[in-house]
Amino acid sequence: ESIPLELHKVRIVQKLSLVPVERRLAAIAEAGNNTFLLKNNDVFLDMLTDSGVNAMSDRQLAAMMEADDSYAGSATFTKLEARINDIFGKKYVLPAHQGRACENIISQAFVRPGTIVPMNYHFTTSKAHVVINGGAVEELIIDEGTAVTSDHPFKGNMDTGKLAALIEQHGADKIAFVRIETGTNLIGGQPHSLANLREIRRVCDRYGVIIVFDASLLADNLHFIKTREPECKDMTIRQISRAIADLTDIIYFSARKLGCARGGVICTNSEEAYLKMRELVTLYEGFLTYGGMSVREIEAIAVGLDETMDEDMVSQGPQFIAFMVEELAKRGVPVITPPGGLGCHIDARRFLPHVPQQQYTAAALAAAVYLAGGIRGMERGTMSEARDEQGNETFAKMELVRLAMPRRVFTLSQVKYAVDRIAWLYDNRALVGGLAFTEEPKLLRFFFGKLAPV
Ligand code: F0G
């Protein structure tokens, strides 16, 4: 048996409670069967996200004590800038309060009504920002990308043939930018390869189109490039990061995946792009040397970036996730394979074949997983989509429950408990029925919409 091994020790702990099933039943009803609306006191294992909830290191905490709190010209920001210059080789660095704030700025700067943003796959907030600026998203993930079970090592790759065809069809001037999301979130934290990025670059260069790279989930993807892409096995994590960065025009990321509570960064070598985005940062985020972040967090981000350049660090999440995926698969539970980053993803359509997508299969399963074990996952399926202009449902290509693995937070016995409860639920899946909206917000409805059993 392969057992993931923690190359760190736990020195600060937080008490958890596991409330009885009667309370869980009341809690999920109060939350409108939406796990986003549960109160954390009712949650035992919070696997909602890996965002803002990863463990911080002793070095990050120490760095936060020496932050330079000036409004303008903060030495702390200079430190972050130097770290970004060093790791990504990008000269211009803009701060924002989190990932979607970077998306707001990039979309406002580059998306015009009628333009298209080809992506390997969308993320909820990235798509919403493109759409709100009048653009359209085209997903060009390889066909294997949305196959639930597969042994393809890089399901996050973009189909570059489709990319070239799309640019030919609409003309390069209609393409706002090409967005590549590393560690592709909504298809199960699946990586792209360095070779694929190189191919995307070739296509974009042919047409003069820029590449915007969402590096929020870079840590996981770096691990997968190192371990799954033979030509990269002798490269260091730092070398892979730089090779990736050199193939992109604008990089942005959410710093919430680095153990921080807040933060986002945009960087580029293009002065023109920088100048376009700079005034939006001061308008929406704050002055250029803090951009909506606290300086303490900027210190933690700088250290977090450095720590991400360490294979012992970036391998921890993927190893725990692989353990969970493989243990569930052994028990017959339908999970996304190969294991990706971010978390373990359950295929709700095969788990609950009797619940149609119209009844939000993944949302129904997320509520049931909470009931079964106090485990909070996140719906990543049709409920996370938006209706079209006529009010019709847009059915998601995949109906998933994501059980995120906050890095260095849970122990292996907690993961084993989750496996046991989910396997029990699978054996009793006939108990789970579908859901219908009782309150349905128009924008990003999955965050605070409420549902009831049909
Ligand atoms: N891009 C990706 C790939 C993300 O995963 C996220 C956030 C964002 C952008 C937006 O960043 O939250 O700092 O505004 N993902 C979190 C998640 C919310 O749970 O998957 P943010």
Image (cartoon, rainbow, N blue to C red):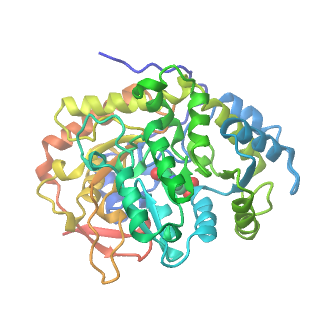
Residue 140 as seen in the image, left or right of residue 452: right
**Percent of width and height locating residue 286:** 76, 63
Tag count in the figure? 0
**Percent of width and height locating residue 58:** 68, 28
Taking 239 as reference, is 383 above or below it?
A: below
Taking 277 as reference, is 244 above or below it?
A: above
Q: Quadrant of residue 228?
A: top left
**Looking at the image, which residue is at 57% across and 60% down?**
100
Q: Quadrant of the C terminus?
A: bottom left
* Residue 375 seen in the figure: no
**Percent of width and height locating residue 269:** 71, 50
Residue 382 as seen in the image, left or right of residue 190: left
Residue 147 as seen in the image, left or right of residue 165: left
**Percent of width and height locating residue 141:** 35, 52
**Looking at the image, which residue is at 38% across and 42% down?**
190
Specify the farthest residue to the top: 1
Taking 194 as reference, is 394 above or below it?
A: below
* Residue 168 seen in the figure: yes
Residue placed most toward the observer, 437 or 334? 334
Specify the farthest residue to the front: 206
Q: Quadrant of residue 169?
A: bottom left
**Looking at the image, which residue is at 28% across and 48% down?**
369
Q: Quadrant of the N terminus?
A: top left
